[in-house]
Amino acid sequence: MAKQNTVFKDAFNRCLKLLAETSSLPSEPELGTTLGVSRTTIRAILTRMEELQLLAWDKRAKVVLRQPEPEDYYPAEETDSLSDIIERSFMRRILAGGAEPGMQINELELARDIGTGTTSVREFLIRFSRFGLIEKRPNSHWILKGFTREFALELTEVREMFELRSAASFTALAPEHPAWAELDKIEALHHGILGDIDNRYKEFSELDERFHLLVHTSSSNRFIVDFYDIITIVFHYHYQWNKTNVRERNARALEEHLDYIAALRSRDPARVETACRRHLRSARETLLQSIQ
Amino acid sequence: MAKQNTVFKDAFNRCLKLLAETSSLPSEPELGTTLGVSRTTIRAILTRMEELQLLAWDKRAKVVLRQPEPEDYYPAEETDSLSDIIERSFMRRILAGGAEPGMQINELELARDIGTGTTSVREFLIRFSRFGLIEKRPNSHWILKGFTREFALELTEVREMFELRSAASFTALAPEHPAWAELDKIEALHHGILGDIDNRYKEFSELDERFHLLVHTSSSNRFIVDFYDIITIVFHYHYQWNKTNVRERNARALEEHLDYIAALRSRDPARVETACRRHLRSARETLLQSIQ
DNA sequence: AAACTGTCTATTGTGGATAAAAGACAAAAT
DNA sequence: ATTTTGTCTTTTATCCACAATAGACAGTTT
């Protein structure tokens, strides 16, 4: 099947939303910038819109003919990139199906299972290996090192070093640095969620990532920022399978965040360190609890 | 050309050395363990040795017929794995040929240049990307972020955090832990090289890696140990192109190491920290000097 | 003059094919 | 009863082909 046209389908769906809001579409380069794709893809989208009688297209004139209907959209399953599909499949496999440490991982079997070529699986595994959960035996299989207690402890040890350092450098940012404005927005969201915690506690996960990423980014160190990818993926999947006391846990974490944010604002190093340590300790406990 | 038989050729060459030392070779599984390859490869080696009239092989009997000659060996160029070749080629390219930050890296062009398929180049770039020197634009090229001063500073910042932490945990190792014995050996090598520094200063680079890896390993943290790969590759190539004052620099580093080793032995945290910091500072200076 | 479109080329993402290498299993040898 | 060998199957490493996507350039429009 060579390359899949998920980029086209996803951009097409997003373009339908744009189309719903105006009577004519802008120029091809402008659309390309807006949707983050090349002109080739834009032109494919416009062609398809013409076919569906959504648009009358003649050079610069791109007149909207009708509102998009639900059936004009490509189904959501078809817009996921192959690497996302492989990632989800793989994570489900190693988290669900009795993934004992030491287990062998077989590229070919994985590929057959997911219904994809070996090349893509292989590239995924190479990319994934930087998370420290799998290891390659050259000319042979991969080994699953497992989502174990040790893994969680090693991960959080580094996380704590990096976040303490980043939090310290955060206080040194100039007052006009955009990070402070972002911090304001994040704080406001915290209050918003806490004010309606029973209905909105599920929004925490995403906000958590946004907040910690902001802190890490202020280190201006690519290794620290890149490391946060590992945290993200681990917590992302962790949130999906540990559902005990989510509401209470999240409420507590939100309070800790607010304390942490106030400490950052105070620019008092000792206070920042205390607040940061307290929050990281409870985050670690939460993670460890979910393991066994 | 499908897969290259570099595993076979390399193992064959190593097997010739074994053959030179005995009158008959051991069993197939035993050879496999010794050379780190499967029986399939061992049997290919034995077959080849028979063809070259080096060996009379009949089941368990593997009688050496003559000593190997230089022409029995496969040439060294043919025993390098493809990924090693790609790595060297790539590093030469980005270090030599005016590698400005922001430059685009083209998989196809790189592959043509090296004379290999695109898949292997792609996989190399994915693996290499964890070193933070390149970055992928999805559906498009890679971008060289460059071996810049910022890169070196970010690298050494993390290195210092990790090494200080590792050095501290080193002092907590039980006296019977094998790391202490390895430390003894490393210390002896330091004295050996310092005693004949004019002739042996080039041995420093390898010893340096061995010493720091030992320290990092004592952290028992996979992320810290894995990070040392980045240091290794950067210093490896760094040593190849910065040749100014090598003798003096290495002599100084050896002295610093000895001081650092003595501090580790003392198990005095403050002393360890001082010695470690001093050495890391001068290592950073050396690296920075070579950049601009 | 600047931005846009038409057209064409080059590169990336992905499946498939194939030689090399690993490894499974039964029969044979110690 | 192990260990070794012969044979066979499976998997990995690598190249190649091709659709999707990006991107370049010249001609056209505002």
Image (cartoon, coloured by chain):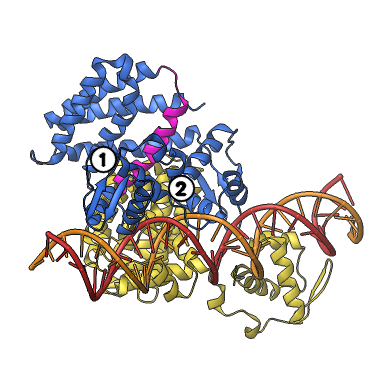
Chain colours: A yellow, B blue, C red, D orange
**Magenta segment:** B223-245
Q: Nearer the viewer, residue B171 or A68?
A: B171
What residue do we see at 53% from left, 51% from top? Answer: B121
* Residue D19 in the image: above or below residue B85: below
What residue do we see at 77% from left, 82% from top? Answer: A53
Q: Main secondary structure of the magenta part?
A: helix
Asked whether, in this view, residue A232 is left or right of residue D5, the answer is right
Magenta span has A113?
A: no
Amino acid at the residue labelled 2: Ser
The picture places residue B234, in percent across and down from the top left corner, at: 42, 36
Q: Nearer the viewer, mark 1 or mark 2?
A: 2
Q: Nearer the viewer, residue B120 or A270?
A: B120
Amino acid at the residue labelled 1: His
Name the image quarter holding the C terminus of chain A. Answer: bottom left
Q: Are marks 1 and 2 in contact (CB under 8 Å)?
A: no
Label 2 environment density (alpha carbons within 10 Å; few <14, some 14–19, many ≥20): few
Q: Which comes before the other along the chain, label 1 or label 2? A: 2
Is residue B209 visible in this depiction of the protein?
A: yes
The residue wearing badge 2 is: B83
Asked whether, in this view, residue B87 is left or right of residue A90, the answer is right
Residue B168: quadrant of the picture: top left
Mark-to-mark CA distance, 1 and 2: 26 Å
* Residue B128 in the image: above or below residue A285: above
The picture places residue B227, in percent across and down from the top left corner, at: 35, 44
Asked whether, in this view, residue B144 is left or right of residue A72, the answer is left
The picture places residue B35, in percent across and down from the top left corner, at: 28, 48
Q: Nearer the viewer, residue A224 or B81?
A: B81
Residue A139: quadrant of the picture: bottom left
Q: Nearer the viewer, residue A157 or B130?
A: B130
Chain containing the residue with disc 2: B
* Residue A197 in the image: above or below residue B186: below
The residue wearing badge 1 is: B216
